[in-house]
Each structure stands twice: as C-alpha cells, then as structure tokens.
Amino acid sequence: MESNIYKVSLKDSVPFNNNAAFCIGTGRMNLALRHEYHKQLEKTQKDIGFSYIRGHGLFCDDMAVYHVYTEDGVEKEEYNFRYIDMVFDDYLSLGIKPFVELGFMPKAMASGDQTIFYWEGNVTPPADYDKWVRLVTASVNHWISRYGIDEVAAWFFEVWNEPNLSGFWKNADMEEYFKLYDLTSRAIKRIDPRLRVGGPSICGVDDERWMRCFLEYCSKNKVPLDFVTRHAYGTELPELDGHYVYQKLRTPKEFMAEPEQSRAIIDEFPEYKGMDMHLTEFNTSYSPLNPIHDTNLNAAYVARVLSELGDTCASYSYWTFGDVFEESGVSFTPFSGCFGLLANGMIPKPTYWAFVFYKKLYPDAIARNDYFVITKSDTGDLRGVAWNPVLEGTQDITLRLSLDLGDGTYFLLMRTVDENTCNPLKTWLDMGSPAYPSNSQLDILKESALPRITTKRFDVSGSSAALDIHLSANALCFFEVQRIKPETDRGFRAELIPGATVY
C-alpha cells in the first residue's frame, strides 16, 4: 500500500474555484414531462442543488413549439409554448434555471431530413433563416413575458450543440454554423442587451481550429459573444458488444488538456481574454452505453477532475443528472451504462456522492493536490474530499495529513464511497442483475448505494494531529474535522457502556 504524508496548515490559502454545482446536464426537454424524471431531479436538487440545467431538443417536434398552416393561400406560422412552459415552470420550482441550448431544428423549418438519436432530432440548418430568427425571438419574448426580464437575464443562451461533429450539424459546416450563430446572437441582443449568448459548444474533434476560427469570426464581424462553450470527455474510441460499449479511459491530465487548450486560445484574443468559458458537457465516456458511468472508478475520476476544472472553466456541467435518457433508445436494465448520477429506480450511483461531497466544501481552500482538496470555515473547521482513481491494477493508498489544529477536542466524520461499501452495481450483479427489480430489490440497491460513515473523537494538545485516510482502489472520501465542546448528562459515563468508546 502506497503511503504519503502531507503537512496542512490552517494558515495557508490555495486557489480553488469550486463550481461543481453550477450546472447539470439532462436528456432532451420532452423527458422532463415524465414523473420519474421529476422525482430524480427533485432528489438531486435536494441533495446537491444545481443552479442551472442544460439539455437538447428544445425546438424538436415532440415539444410541439413550431407549426405552419395555410390560410387564404398564404403560409403562416404559429408557436405553442405549452410544453416548454411545463418544463421551465418545473425547473424553476425546483430552484434550477435553464441554461438554454437553442436547437434542434423543427422539421417544418429544416432544410434536410438528417437526424440524430433514437428520438430523431433534426440537425440541418433552417431552410429559411428568417423563420429561425422569428422562432428564437418569439421564444425569448415569451419567456420574458412569463418570467420577467430580471429572471431571463440570469439565464444563458447557447447556440446549438457540437456543430463541429457531422452527426450534430450537417456536414459539420463551419461557415453555416457561424451564420446560424451570428443571426441568433444578434436576434437575442436586439430583444435586450442584458441577455447572455454564447457558443460554439464544440467537442473534441478538430476543436482547436474550430475554437480559433469561431473567435476570429466573432471578432472580425463584431458578433455578440458573452461567454464561450465547449465539451470534454475522457475516453477513446469504443468497442461495441451487444447493447454496450467499452472504452479506454484517458488520464485526468490528458482530459484536462482540452479545456486548457481552449482557455489558452480564448486568451490569445485581447477582447476575449479572461472571458468565461463554460464546459457545458463533461463525463468520462461520451456514450450512454458505457458501464463505466455506473462504477466507483467513475466517481473517483470525476472527483479528481472536479478539483481542477475551476482553474480554466467558469462552470462544468456533468452529463447528466439522471438515467431517464434516450439517445440510444430506452435502457434495458437499471445499470445500462447511461450517463446519470441517479440510476432509474432512484438509485444513487457512486458519482452522485462526488457532487454531494463537493457541495459540502467550504469556500476557502487551504490545501489541494492530485489526491485531495481541503477547505476551511471561518471558525477553523475543515472539510475535504479525497480520491483514488486507479486506471490499471488495484493500488490502495493511505494519505496521512498532519494538521496544525489548536488545542482542544475534535470530532472527525468520514463518508467513504468504495467498491466494498457503496457499490450498487455490484449488488445488482450479485442479486442476478434483474432487468426489472422488484420493490424489495430496489430497496436493497438503494441501501447499498449509501456511503459508509465512520466517526472519531480525539484530543489535541501541544502539537499537530495526524489524520489517516485509507483509500482502496477507486475510492472516494469526504471528511470533516470540527472542534467540539463535549457535553454529558449527570452520571453518564461512556467508559462503562460496552461499545461506546470503540476506536
């Protein structure tokens, strides 16, 4: 077992931008009309509390927004915001705002019939850009009328999704996307200059050229741009086997190279230097058929990159919060390799706890490295997260923290997520991997999806305290150190109670 010793001073201060709970991804908008979706989002908001949510399919036909009809021989347009209102009303009632992705193309407006995903989102440019601009304008004006300009001005508007990939934008036509972005961003700004619009929402194919050309176009043509967006995933090409794919996971350093590259390109432009870059999608694998999403390795890996993403990104949105998701069709089992933090059946996956733990951290960090981040409250209490993603082998580690705590009595709380104690995937496999678990089986799966809690009381007198954090392969741990003033009832003697003073 590898062992490392780290001295941690409460007087230190290190950079740490913790925006783990800023934004979360979701499947297409129509899924938000389903009960299980609402329950999963409600639980996620209760336990984590994301500020924004982003997903596809806002203008797809299953949202019934765009309609054309003929009257007196003249083609006319009309809009129906009923379903969008239901979705956005529900989001706002749960304390989460839309990070609006403008897309895909209504079929009656599309220039072609190319689609993507099981639910057939049209990914061709509009046949008539004036119609697209009118749709965007009508939508934004409707939201302002319904929610007020102060509310809508707090949203973000992102133009399209991954246009550098031919699957998401016909022929990955850069010039055509720039036209779409130009006209869309100007239409939004004409409504109110306070509204925020950005792009190009690219992923890791030819991304360096796309990012530079996009910024050059916006700069040269004075196109509105309030923030920049891109995506990042941590796996290589997939191998398909039945309903599933398997991919090699890149190292966290290799993963971080993509947002770091984009950050550097943005800062090459004087007018965009320091501009917010939002990572509007990230995960390990980009496939909803990869079982890695259900694993403890995924949790430890994500915890590791969460500690660094704030160095380059204003926000970073995990793709996605739940497994009510249909890009490749409806999943056959509760552990199908889908992206979500919650498996269907309301089962938290290990990665769920990475976000719960990060949300609990204090704003001020005193230590951060490749293994942990530690934060401090105004009163000197500590909260930290530690991780041990192992891409090959089964290496355990022990982190020994030497903490310069003042004299007194302290309470230590540790919540551990590892392959032995918080691994619902293993439990599901052990029970025979039922495709449709019974209620009693679901109860067992949810119980097995909880972190292990351990506690300790210790005294410090005249020297620093040593805290050992044991992390098995792919483990994740939240720890808290709090100064306490013990209180006991008259005659209560813990040393006389069997089991009360176990260390």
Image: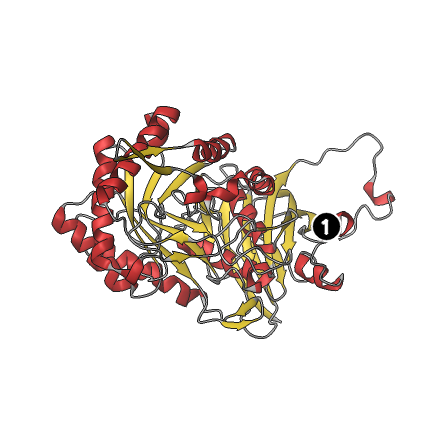
- Where residue 482 appears, x then y in whole percent? 60, 42
Please give left or right for residue 110 compared with residue 7 in the image.
left
Q: How many marks?
A: 1
Residue ID for mark 1: 442
405, 389: nearer the viewer: 389
Task: Decide: few, some or many residues near mark 1? Use Cα within 10 Å; few <14, some 14-19, many ≥20.
Answer: some
Identify the element where label 1 is drawn.
Answer: helix
- Where residue 34 appears, x then y in whole percent? 57, 40
Farthest-out residue, left: 220
Please give left or right for residue 89 compared with residue 407 in the image.
left
- Where residue 78 appears, x then y in whole percent? 33, 33
239 is higher (above) or lower (below) than 326:
below
503, 279: nearer the viewer: 279
* Residue 88 visible, this angle: yes
Q: Give the residue type at disc 1.
A: Leu
Taking the spot 23% from the left edge, 37% from the top edge, the residue there is: 187
88 is higher (above) or lower (below) than 145:
below
428 is higher (above) or lower (below) than 151:
below
Taking the spot 46% from the left edge, 67% from the top edge, the residue there is: 235
- Where residue 112 appears, x then y in whole percent? 31, 55
Please give left or right for residue 411 compared with residue 87 in the image.
right
Please give left or right for residue 73 compared with residue 401 in the image.
left
